[in-house]
Image (tube, grey):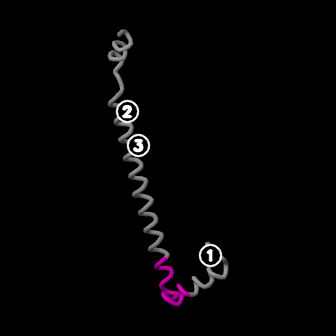
């Protein structure tokens, strides 16, 4: 991690490259990108959990099948 002095240099270089007017636009764009990434990862997690639950439900015995397995 850069120290305090390095951070100041980095901020100054960014100001010189992009200008003070463009920095809020860049920050807004980065924030929107992060939100989209979070949404996508949440959707993927939900799909995986749904798939796990579907597999779990499809492999369970019905009550009658369970009784027959226990009798044998």
* Circle on res. 26: none
Residue 34 sits above or below residue 54 on the image:
below
Residue 69 lies in the magenta stretch: no
Q: Secondary structure at mark 1?
A: loop
- Where residue 60 appears, as percent x and y from the top left, is 36, 26
* Marks 3 and 1, how far apart at CA: 39 Å
Quarter assignment of residue 70: top left
- x 39%, y 57%: residue: 40
* Marks 2 and 1, how far apart at CA: 48 Å
> Which residue, given by chain and number where applicable, does mark 1 sit on?
2
> Which residue, given by chain and number where applicable, does mark 2 sit on?
56
Q: Nearer the viewer, mark 2 or mark 1?
A: 1
Magenta span of residues: 13-26
For the residues bearing labels 3 and 1, Cβ distance under 8 angstroms: no
Crowd around label 3: few <14 · some 14–19 · many ≥20 (10 Å): few
* Marks 2 and 3, how far apart at CA: 10 Å
Crowd around label 2: few <14 · some 14–19 · many ≥20 (10 Å): few
If the image is split into quadrants, where does the C terminus sit?
top left
Tag 1 or tag 2, which sits nearer the N-term?
Answer: 1
Q: How many marks?
A: 3
Tag 1 or tag 3, which sits nearer the N-term?
Answer: 1
- Where residue 1 appears, as percent x and y from the top left, is 61, 72
Tag 3 or tag 2, which sits nearer the N-term?
Answer: 3
Quarter assignment of residue 4: bottom right
* Circle on res. 49: 3
Crowd around label 1: few <14 · some 14–19 · many ≥20 (10 Å): few
């Amino acid at each position: 991690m850069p120290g305090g002095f390095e951070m100041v240099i980095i901020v100054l270089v960014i100001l010189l490259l992009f200008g003070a007017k463009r920095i809020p636009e860049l920050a807004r764009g980065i924030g929107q990108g992060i939100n989209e990434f979070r949404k996508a990862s949440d959707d993927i997690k939900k799909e995986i959990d749904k798939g796990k639950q579907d597999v779990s439900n499809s492999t369970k015995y019905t009550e009658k099948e369970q009784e027959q397995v226990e009798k044998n």
